[in-house]
Amino acid sequence: MSDRLAVVLQYLLPKQALTALAGKFAGAHAGVLTTAVIRWFVGRYGVNMAEAANPDIASYASFNEFFTRPLKPDARALGEAEFICPVDGAISQCGVILRDRIFQAKGHDYSTRALVGGDAVLAAQFENGSFATLYLSPKDYHRIHMPCAGRLLSMIHVPGDLFSVNPVTARGVPGLFARNERVVCVFEGECGLFVVVLVGATIVGSMATVWHGVVNPPRPGQLREWRYEDQQLLFKQGEEMGRFLLGSTVVMLFPQGTLQFNAEWSPQRAIRLGEKMGERVV
């Protein structure tokens, strides 16, 4: 199938209905059917169950339980760096935010304001800052961890489309990550404010955070925001902060003059949770 046709199909598919149906199945306790689907998925995508805290496929009561499986305690080592990779996956793009524009793919970019749900004051904090867009494939570990220590200030659920977020769609759908449904998590750390955005996609049944639980569903169709400034919700570097129930993409924003990426960080490179992402700009 050509890339152009794949993108056209994305516009035509009933993405919301497919996602709702997939979410219901993923949460169902269907016994041998659930086990059969998990076994097929592991074989189809090459999931490394040897890294899982529980490698027994038959013991997972639902597909969601399997998909959000924890890793063994020693499966990932945290690198000695001020900023570490928060997920397993691949680098879609990373680099400098040009004023307020984030590079998506050749011929496509989008604004920080659109990404964070229209908050101009928040978006202004990242003018000429740094960004990283990290893609999680079906085989990857789907929990998200902290790239650096931080205190949670707010969370915003932004309604939107549910396009696929694979590389083909990223090249073909303008403003993809700022038009898909997403959960914007705003933290304060030693570098100042930073943002971790969980971006939904077709078949992504829901997204969850450790402080809130499942954020979506419900999907009321309007922006929702939770404020935490009056609480001391502190997270250490490498600590789990959220998860995808079926896979998607994480976008991170950092202020100007904060992050200098590791020389090995470049688009399409495979990455692992805990590896060195970069250091503070001196």
Image (cartoon, rainbow, N blue to C red):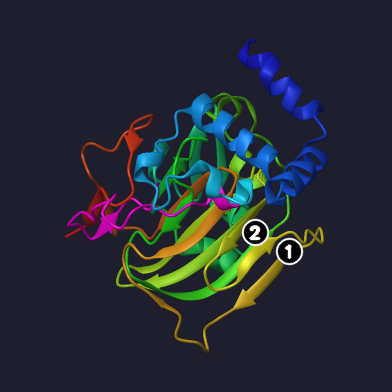
The residue sitting at 46% across, 45% down in the picture is 56
Q: Amino acid at mark 2?
A: Gly
Residue 191 image point, x, y percent: 31, 68
SS category of the residue bearing label 1? loop
SS category of the residue bearing label 2? loop
- Residue 79 forms part of the magenta stretch: yes
- Are circles 1 and 2 on residues that touch, CB within 8 Å? yes
Instruction: State the extent of the magenta-drawn residues as a range.
Output: 65-87
Q: Residue furthest bottom?
A: 230
Q: Amino acid at mark 1?
A: Leu
In the displayed structure, would residue 75 be above or below residue 175? below
Q: Quadrant of the N terminus?
A: top right
> Closest to the observer: 115 or 201?
201
The residue sitting at 74% across, 44% down in the picture is 25
The residue sitting at 33% across, 53% down in the picture is 72
Q: Quadrant of the C terminus?
A: bottom left
> Closest to the observer: 47 or 34?
34
Residue 220 image point, x, y percent: 82, 61
Specify which label sits upstream in the sequence, 1 or 2. 2
Q: Quadrant of residue 32?
A: top right
- Residue 240 forms part of the magenta stretch: no
Closer to the eye: label 1 or 2: 1
> Closest to the observer: 247 or 32?
32
Residue behind mark 2: 117
In the displayed structure, would residue 16 be above or below residue 37? below
Q: Residue furthest top?
A: 1
